[in-house]
Image (spheres, helix red, strand yellow):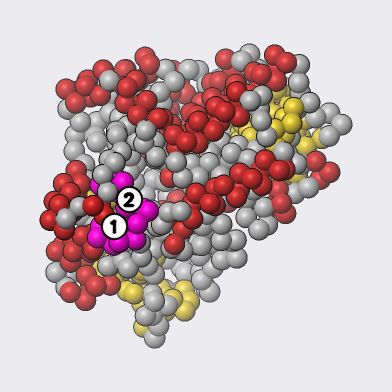
Amino acid sequence: MSSTREGQHPTPLATGTSLNAIVIGAGFAGLYMLYRLRKLGLSARVFEAGSGIGGTWFWNRYPGARCDIPSMEYSYQFDQQLEQEWEWSERYATQPEILDYINHVANRFNLRPDIELNTRIQAAHFDETQSRWKLGTADGREFSARYCIMATGCLSSANLPAIPGIDRFAGESYHTGRWPHEGVDFSGKRVAVIGTGSSAIQSIPLIADQASELYVFQRTPNYSVPAHNRPLGDEEQASFKANYRALRELGFKEHPFGFAHRMRQDLCSEATAEQRQQRYQEYWERGGLQFLGAYADLMLDKDANASAAEFLRQKIASQVDDPEVAAALTPRQVVGSKRLCVDTRYFATYNRPHVHLVDLKAAPIAQITEDGLIAGETVYQFDAIVYATGFDAMTGALARIDIRGRQGQKLADKWAAGPRTYLGLASAGFPNLFFITGPGSPSVLTNMLPSIEQHVNWISDCIAHLQESGKTRIEADETAQETWVEHVNEVANATLFPVANSWYLGANIPGKPRVFMPYIGFPSYVEKCHQVVANGYEGFSLS
């Protein structure tokens, strides 16, 4: 489906620097937040550092970039006509198609006039005398608003590793999260990829198609299941659209990760070895992240998880010809404790003679040189280096803004030992400041679109309540916040999610506190948010 792409000139912004609300970030969250604020009749503006809208899908343009949630589910549900009119071409949409969709939404609802691109917010300070947020841009302008809403994204702050000599390399350097918009041609080049997370697993097969030599530098191998991507037929789309309401409801009421299907209730611990093998094979053939839902106890019971992990290890061995390479590619951690990846011919790529795997645990990178790098005692020469080293997840983008609440308290200081929020929506000491899918909410452990819409709807309804009741200020209570933080950790510790050093805990960022950031269980979280409102915004102070 065609739509306006970035680069076209939007309607000029309305004048004035004093607004009802300011939203930071123009991805899925920022666009829908603007839509809801307009519905409330409020003056609002979205500020976006990039030159186009789309958030994650504007920046992540690396080869093979696509969603790991089925396209039909990874979409807005606030407008039924939008649901029915948009046609997805594949089971898992590519980055360009998702960006087309986002631009279509911006055009369809005429959102561009209130979006300012190429504008980075550097500071957001709360003025207690006026109960307003004062925001400063990188180019020296100032704005103020009653409400400040962070739609900065959970995976938007690219993590470039602190490797000695990283600035010395004279060849081409890329980060998967900041890919050139014009694309990159690796034909005939010697290429290094550092990292084997999701973006590497998606991009490595396509980079290998072009490069004359490809070296993959791996610190920790990852589990990955096949995508089994395919075109979406007309009948399949029509069937899904005819049942959208019921399917969306499943995500909100039944599935712990917000997916549009029922979660199995049977336990691996009660199945025979033959039944387990058959079930895992069934889910392997389905493909995608559903694999972790093969049994209800895979993320609760170590023995159950171990059986699933062993199945995946056997699949790696069956796809990689060289036993030593297969062994190096085989993870040993609990499956799911690091985000499960979804791939297309990733493991088979290592059967190609020009693709080489380097185990960084055996030979760590000592330094980047002008023409390559040194790992262990081996000197490598490259024409290009690709850093597939992920993001400073959930808090990284917020940390780049000087956010100060009551009495000048810095959010960075308050969160020095780890993020502290109430419901992932607000933080004590920072009135009228909202986070969309912030730490302490389900966010990255869900289908992000339902999570985003649930948060935006809650924030919009909250602001409407304040307007109707003549209130100008809402702030999370410290006690409610601390109780919630304890609850988030209690729920996480009852599962296997926190047992590995993953970006869920910030373990990929040197010096970042090890705190499990997402809340586990979307339906129970949604119910808690409903209860808070029903009890008069319990845990918040309104004034």
* Residue nearest the viewer, comparing 35 with 373: 35
Contact check, label 1 and label 2, Cβ < 8 Å: yes
Height in image: 417 above or below 531? below
* Residue nearest the viewer, comparing 65 with 439: 439
**Residue topped by disc 1:** 304
In x, y percent, where is residue 298? 32, 52
Q: Quadrant of residue 322?
A: bottom left
Q: Residue furthest right?
A: 129
Which amino acid, mark 1? Ala
Height in image: 338 above or below 383? above
Secondary element at image label 2: loop
Is any atom of residue 186 visible in this view? no
Height in image: 355 above or below 519? below
Relative placement, left or right, of 3 versus 209 is right
Mark number displayed over residue 297: 2
Q: CA distance from mark 1 to mark 2?
A: 7 Å
Which amino acid, mark 2? Asp
Magenta region, residue range: 292-308
